[in-house]
Amino acid sequence: MDELQRLLDEAAIQRVLVQYCRGVDRGDEALIRDVYWPDATDDHGGYKGSGYGFAPYVVKALNAHALATQHGLQQASIELSGETAHVESYVLARHKVRRDGRLVLETFGGRYVDRFEKRGGAWRIAHRQVVYDWSKLEPIVAETPNDAFEHGERSREDASYRR
């Protein structure tokens, strides 16, 4: 594989990873579903099934559970082998939730261990295994005054959809 093609493939895979996080944080089923091949599988611990089925599952679960979410990728190791790539991405997922009338920040440190496949020139996830490394719960005792900022939305009403 030449160097330029390797860089293009890695960039395409990175775009898929970022799209996934954006889709989860914005509650956008279409963005999430589009990162998976139709026959893809996903093992998210509490959810084991199709990638396409994970999209509505996670949107519904997070809309019921979290006031806000933010999924951030730390780094990704991408091993290309022809039309297949083995990808390990470190993720920090933060969920602002209300528990027993109090605000709590749930932080999850883990990894997405993915097998990507390139089909018809496009890279998508063929299988995802979420690996748990650690987690933390913290009470939110106070928040920085934020009335001057536009608030994020878990929908297409979010500022990031305006063009």
Image: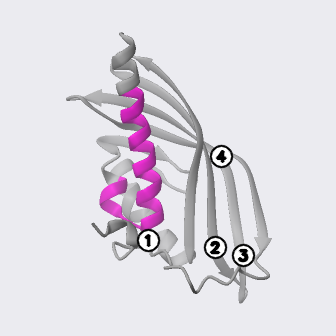
Measured as percent of width and height from the top left, residue 92 is found at 64, 52
Whether tag 2 and tag 4 are in contact, CB under 8 A, the answer is no
Marks 4 & 1, CB-CB < 8 Å contact: no
Work out whether mark 1 precedes mark 3 in sequence or the reverse, and give the earlier one.
Answer: 1
Cα distance in 3D space between marks 3 and 2: 6 Å
Task: Tell me the distance, in whole angstroms, between the alpha carbons under discs 4 and 1.
Answer: 22 Å
Q: Are marks 3 and 2 in contact (CB under 8 Å)?
A: yes
Expressed as whole percent of the image width and height from the top left, the position of residue 103 reads 71, 81
> Quadrant location of the C terminus?
bottom left
Residue bearing the label numbered 4: 110
Query: In terms of secondary structure, what is the magenta stretch mainly?
Result: helix
Looking at the rendering, in which quadrant would you find the N terminus?
top left
Q: Helix or strand or loop: what does disc 4 sit on?
A: strand
> Mark 2–mark 1 contact, CB under 8 Å?
no
Q: Residues within 10 Å of mark 2 (few under 14, many from 20)?
A: some
Amino acid type at circle 1 is Lys
Q: Is residue 100 visible?
A: yes
User: Is residue 49 at all visible to an observer of this figure?
Assistant: no
90 part of magenta stretch: no
CA distance separating discs 4 and 3: 19 Å
Pointer 2 residue: 96
Badge 4 amino acid: Gly
Give the label on residue 104, or none.
3
Mark 1 and 3 residues: CB-CB less than 8 Å, in contact? Answer: no
Magenta stretch, residue numbers: 9-32
Please determine whether, in this image, residue 34 is positioned above or below residue 163: above
Q: Which residue is mark 1?
A: 60
Residue 82 at x, y percent in the picture: 35, 15
Estimate the spatial distance between the alpha carbons at disc 1 and disc 3, rounded to whole Å: 20 Å
